[in-house]
Each structure stands twice: as C-alpha cells, then as structure tokens.
C-alpha cells in the first residue's frame, strides 16, 4: 500500500470515529431529553409546525444511527433532516435554531467526509487483494 493510500486510510479512520463518537453522544443526549420529558411527543397534540420540526429531527437521528453501517446514506439522512428542521424553523419563526442544534451538523458532515474519503475495504480481502479479470470469473 502506498504512503498516500495509508494516509487517506488513517484520515478516514479518524474522521469515521470522530463522527461515530459525536453522533453517539448527541443521539444519547436526545434520548435522555426524550426520556426526561416522559417519552416522545404525541403528534395529535402538536401543531403542524411542531410536527414538521419533529419529522426533521427524527430523520436526523435516524441518520445518525444508519450511518454506523452506511455512512453515505446516514449522512444524507442526517444532513437532510437537519436542513429540513432549519428551514421549517426559519419559515415559522424567522430565526435559525440556537442552543445545541448547530452541534448536530458536526457528525453529519464528518460522516459525509468519511464516505467521500473512500469505501471500506474488506478485512478478509485486504486492501491490496488482486481483482479477478472478467475472463477469470
């Protein structure tokens, strides 16, 4: 394996685990808040805006979970859900969300960067496993 490939592999590993740690911590924070509030909100008692905000936030958190196995898909779901949440909040109140909400961009961006740095290599095959030619298959 070349030096550049080794550097990219090491960078991807650091980025992937930074995304996993930050995503897990934020997901855990959300779970603690939901439990502390007595469970998830009843959508029948929420306004349309609150239901749309909840939808975006659920998509964001689903993306944080999915990204453990499918980084690109999870990143898209997390960033799309958070972007939707921000748009709804901006349209409804004229302000962007504050508090801890900007922190939720971090794991989504890191998962997207990890996915962009390249696919996982199979530990069984190894990164330098020779590929079979089409006529040999």
Image: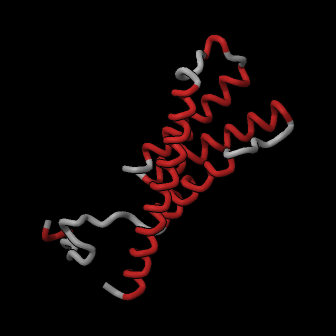
- Residue 66, how many percent across, how many down? 43, 44
User: In the picture provided, is 94 more to the left or to the right than 122?
Assistant: right
- Residue 61, how many percent across, how many down? 52, 39
The N terminus lies in which quarter of the figure? bottom left
Q: Is residue 135 above or below residue 66?
A: below
Q: Is residue 49 above or below residue 133?
A: above
Quarter assignment of residue 120: bottom left
- Residue 94, how many percent across, how many down? 86, 37
The C terminus lies in which quarter of the figure? bottom left
Q: Residue furthest front?
A: 36
Q: Who is closer to the viewer here, 4 or 14?
A: 14
Count of numbered labels shown in the rendering: 0
- Residue 126, how many percent across, how many down? 23, 72
Quarter assignment of residue 128: bottom left
Q: Residue furthest right?
A: 94
User: In the picture provided, is 85 more to the left or to the right than 96?
Assistant: left
Residue at 43% across, 61% down:
17
Residue at 57% across, 32% down:
33
Residue at 18% across, 66% down:
124
Residue at 58% across, 57% down:
109
């Amino acid at each position: 394996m070349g030096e550049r490939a080794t550097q990219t592999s090491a960078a991807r590993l650091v980025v992937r685990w930074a995304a996993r740690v930050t995503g897990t911590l934020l997901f855990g924070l959300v779970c603690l808040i939901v439990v502390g509030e007595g469970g998830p909100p009843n959508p029948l008692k929420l306004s349309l805006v609150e239901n749309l905000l909840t939808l975006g936030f659920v998509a964001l958190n689903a993306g944080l979970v999915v990204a453990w196995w499918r980084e690109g898909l999870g990143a898209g779901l997390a960033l799309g859900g958070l972007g939707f949440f921000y748009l709804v909040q901006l349209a409804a109140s004229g302000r962007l969300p504050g508090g801890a909400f900007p922190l939720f961009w971090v794991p989504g961006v890191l998962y997207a960067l990890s996915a962009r740095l390249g696919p996982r290599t199979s530990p069984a095959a190894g990164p330098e496993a020779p590929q079979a030619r089409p006529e040999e298959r």
